[in-house]
Amino acid sequence: MKPNHALPRRGFGLLVAVCLALLLTVSPRPLQAADDALLKKLMEENAALRQENADLRKRFDALTPPPSPAPAAQPGTPAAPAAATTAPAAPVATNSPASSEDVVMLSPFSVTSDKDHGYLKTNAATATRIGMEIQKVPMNISVVSREFIDDTNAKSLMDILRYTSSSSGDTRWAMRRPGNEATPQGAFTMRGFPVNTLMENGVFRYISYNIDNVDRVEIVKGPAAVFFGQGYPGGVINYVTKQPSFAKIPDTFRHSINDNSGQKLVLDFNKPLSKYAAFRMTGAWDDQQGERRFEFRKNYNLTPSVTLIPFDSKVLTVNLAMEYVNESFNQNDYDWIWSDFAGWKAAAAGSAKVANSVNTPSLAYATYINNKRIATGNYSLPAYTSVERGAYYTNASGNFIHDKAFNYTSRGARTNNEVAAFTATVDFSPVSWLDGRYVFQHDNSRFNNIEGVTTPYADGIHWNVGASATSGYYRNTDTHQLDLIFKFETGGIKHKLLTGYNRTVWLQNYFGNDIKFTPYYGHVPGATNPIANPGYGTTGGTQVADNLVGEGRGHDTGVPVVNQVVRDRNGQIKLVKAVYSDFDPGYETYPTIDILFPLNRAWLDGYKPILDAGYLNYQAAALDDRLNVIAGFRRQWREEKGQYLASNYPWYVVPVDAWKYPSQYPEDVYGYSANYVKTNIYRRHGDAWMGGASFAVTKALTVYTSVSKTFQFNLGNVGGVFTGNERPVIQSALDQNGGHFMYQGTNITSVDQLVAIQAAKGAYDDLKDETGMNYEFGAKISTADSKIVGTLSFFRGERTNQKLDDTARQSNLEEPLNSNTTLFAPGTVGYNTRVFRWRTTNLKNRIEGSEAEVIWTPMPNLQTVINGSWLWTAKTLYDKTRPAPGSTAYNALSTAGKVASDIYYNARIENVPEYKFTAFGKYTFLDGALQKLSIGGGARYSSKTVVSRSVDWNPLAGGYQAGNYVVFDATVGYPWRLFRYDITSSFGIYNLTDKQYSEGSFVLSPGRNWLLTNTVSF
């Protein structure tokens, strides 16, 4: 039997929904006729904030001597949260509700504007380090507001990308291991390139991108190279969190329920403590179930923060914030991709059987398709031409059924993220010509997971429940960031010189499962049964050894549970391992894989990198601020001092410099490799730069252009060898061949001779660093009344020197030491192993295109975000590992090899839609029977995206491609009053037509789903 969601819980959720709907209809607040009151209600705090902002501007003008330049790009609004690219910003302007005349504090790092409301955000800080009008920044910047996040039911980064032009999500992203400064998580793209620069308040966040405490998300298209030098040319994503406000803003408590009975509570509490201190707390509790069986998401998080203005001089602001996040989840990570299942089943009938099974065929689907290619002579035949939600299998009645709720992520597989972070931000303005900010952040992040995917065999009955691994990444990071702004004016030109320094040090440990003892089947039914575990109680079990905890005795009676077994659909007792490797979902209980990993994991590796970076950035405004120029340079260093490893704690802890003292710390005692450690001792640097300018042709129209260069460190050497490890291999070959052997036409008689040959081939040279370039020009429009605000851009992005395995050079044909069984005797050093893992950086990818976004607000009660992109080029220009069609190397390839190269060079780069268009709008009725009711709707379109440029997914011959969808969303909301509490109820239906589609990869996106939310303001 297959477990289902608990009916009482679903019933409770539906009961809550019905009760809330009844309250909405019988307890409406009396309608108010005055438009000014309605607008105040619609925009909540914004009207009051704009008034306070106007007062502040007047008082600030009075306090500031005339020729001193304003300390901020835009005047601040007291209630608006500040954003910065280094850490949570202090409040822009601070005032106590009791005495709003006393405190005025404006920060150049703030993001504020009296034009902002709803979906419209006109300032950003991510691209330029300081708060600056988007209209003046020579880059494409998109800001996703909190209101837009809520209206579109965005719960993750992938959801945010749904309504972002030139982007493509990854439906497998959730279950991937975390990325880092050098490696992205998953395969989602921005402008055709992966994104690894994911920030929270401008500081790199390792895991768990919490949205519950977010005020806005700033997305920079293309690299903000000076401030985030190491990264890909696709862009930067910065989560800006809610900050304490000195203004009176509503406290809110929000409850949500979804169509799978998932519940969520979110609290946002703000309290001005005095005119010198304000406190804010956001928190959430989340208990969700997914549309697939055994999917779940549990999350609780807290973000308390306090802002202090300690001196009456108002020259110093301190913000202290803590964040704790603990989340765990299981999410489907596969779908039905076996397009020719019937042919596979027929071909597998006579194949060998799966181990531990009775008659389950072992023929792999990939083998079947490859045999079919050879038999038909069609080497371009794709393996996967369609994808369906769920799975097909034979149920207990013998019928072949389609189970749309099937979850391919094995039961018991899960990811757990835990984050405990503290951030201190100090803004200071000691003199009129100098502003500064110092940020310290301590981030303790822990990622743990159990991995496994369940896949079918060809008989239509049995499946393999994968339990591949369990891993842990523990990272403890300290970041220090100092930014200084020097301001002066000459000849009518306003100058700003920004300089800063960043140091990030982290200790990261990697833990993996102990392959000697896991997976451990001692807790699986049948472990103490001599049929399920042959030999148990006599010679020793062949499935599980006789070292079982408690020897399988019952908890209450103490009687051995000899007959606790799993039987197949024919009543036969299953072997213990067959419970997983030969699972029958139509009849048997779905086994959970977490019990296979009861032991703690081994500490496999540890690192302590040090990143130092310094930058210099010049910004100038001339011609009455019509001309704005930005230029800058950044140098970043990366240093490592070795390997931080405890091979057998507490007995053997390896000093980082143990390799220097081999007699005191022998490798065979302390379990480390000196040659490996020495490759992790280095100090390297990379450079990034950018330049750009914008010019206001009219008050409404601005044109701009910019160019940026970024980089990625490529660590290691070209030969892919830990220098020194090759020497015993060469000596072994000499020993096995009488003191000499032939190597590529040369008679080798000594180790040094072959080492010199490899050095001449560049094996020990450092890999070149990766380079990213972005060239861009465009136009921005912002009408005087801000009813139309938009950006149009044209760009070219290039990624060069990506590190790749050179598989041809790694082959025995080109590297005779690799996979060699003739130079070496079986069991000797070097026998059938890869000695040199040759790598290359000889590759360039190019993306060219255009994108546009418009925020249209023709009236206060109507707002719409419309964007689209056309990426007409998404291709590989050259790749040393793949011969290009027409080349000499290509002509020498086999037919299958030519097909592979044809696909690689003629298909688009993976996960890059040529066209994307999205629109979302919301309208609120101001009068009549529907007064105060808001309705919203959205449409999302994407053209096809390539899953893989491989023959299995061959997009040139009908292989499955993601994208190619039009999806609609709809929302409705209504404010009402219960007793003395203001309540806003909203109901959204997403994927309105239940479209079967994928936003990226072969895993399908969620089907139709709904969310009911009630927010209480007090």
Image: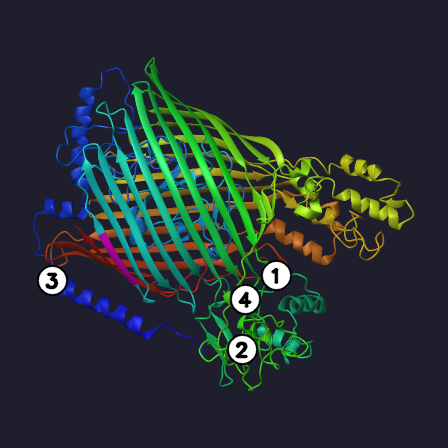
Q: Dot 1: within a 10 Å radius of its alpha carbon, few (fewer than 14), some, or many (20 or more) residues?
A: many
Q: Is residue 932 in sight in this rendering?
A: no
Residue where numbered disc 4 is placed: 596
Secondary element under disc 1, as helix, strand or loop, is helix
Q: Residue furthest right?
A: 738
The magenta segment:
253-257
As measured in the structure, the alpha-carbon distance from the residue carrying label 1 to the one carrying label 2 is: 27 Å
Amino acid under label 3?
A: Ser
Residue 616 highlighted magenta (yes or no): no
In primary-sequence order, the first of circles 4 and 1 is: 4
In primary-sequence order, the first of circles 1 and 3 is: 3
Q: Position of residue 31 (x, y in %)?
A: 8, 55
Q: Position of residue 604 (x, y in %)?
A: 59, 50
Give the number of callouts: 4
Q: Nearer the viewer, mark 4 or mark 1?
A: 4
As measured in the structure, the alpha-carbon distance from the residue carrying label 2 to the one carrying label 3 is: 53 Å
Q: Are marks 2 and 3 in contact (CB under 8 Å)?
A: no
Q: Nearer the viewer, mark 1 or mark 2?
A: 2
The answer to whether residue 868 is left or right of residue 554 is: left
Q: Judge by depth and name the residue closer to the eye, 631 or 696.
A: 631
